[in-house]
Amino acid sequence: MAISSASREAFSRSLTIAMMNFSATRAGDDFDFPYKEVWPILKEMVKRIGSEHLLWGTDMPFQNRFCTYRQSRDWIEKHCTFLGQEDLARLMGGTAARILGV
C-alpha cells in the first residue's frame, strides 16, 4: 500500500510537533541554558512547519527555576544562529501579532 505525499507530510508535521512538545517546551526540565540539545528540534520545526506557524512563549514566573526571563529569549535570539532575521522576527512576535491582528 502506497502512502501519499500528503499523508507523509501530515505525519512529518505531527512528528515535529510531538518532538517540540516533548523537548523544547520543557527544555529547562532536562537541559541547561542555552539548551543546545533543543536547537536541532527548533531548526527542524522551522523547516517542516514554517516560522509563520510558530511562536515563542514562556512559562514565567514558573520558568524562573531554570533560567531568567532574558535567558528565555536569549537562547533563541542569540544562540540559534541558524535562524534568519525573518524567521526570528516571526518567532519572537511576528506570528503572534499576525494571529492577533495587531
Image: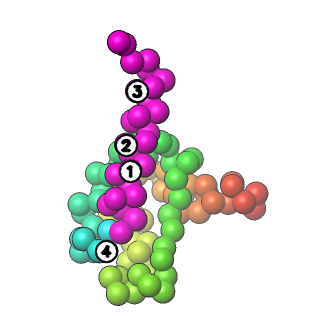
Which quadrant is home to the N terminus? top left
Q: Which of marks 4 and 2 is in front?
A: 2
Say which residue appears at 50% left-offset and 64% top-offset: 56
C-alpha gap between disc 4 and disc 2: 21 Å
x then y, percent, for residue 47: 41, 40
Q: Residue furthest right?
A: 101
Q: Name the residue under label 3.
A: 8
Where 60 falls versus 53 (above or below)? below
Asked whether disc 3 touches disc 2, contact meaning CB atoms under 8 Å apart, the reply is no
Q: Which of the two discs, 4 and 2, labels the residue nearer the N terminus?
A: 2
Query: Residue flagged by tag 3: what amino acid is it?
Result: Arg
Mark 3 lies on a secondary structure that is helix
Magenta-colored stretch includes residue 9: yes
Mark 2 lies on a secondary structure that is helix
Q: Mark 1 points at which residue?
A: 18
- The dot on residue 28 is 4
Q: Mark 2 points at which residue?
A: 15
Residue closer to the observer: 51 or 6: 6
Residue closer to the observer: 35 or 25: 25
Query: Residue flagged by tag 2: what amino acid is it?
Result: Leu
C-alpha gap between disc 1 and disc 2: 5 Å
x then y, percent, for residue 27: 32, 68
C-alpha gap between disc 3 and disc 1: 15 Å
Q: Which of the two discs, 3 and 1, labels the residue nearer the N terminus?
A: 3
Mark 1 lies on a secondary structure that is helix
User: Magenta span covers which residues?
Assistant: 1-26
Which quadrant holds residue 24?
Answer: bottom left
Q: Which of the two discs, 3 and 4, labels the residue nearer the N terminus?
A: 3
Asked whether disc 4 touches disc 1, contact meaning CB atoms under 8 Å apart, the reply is no
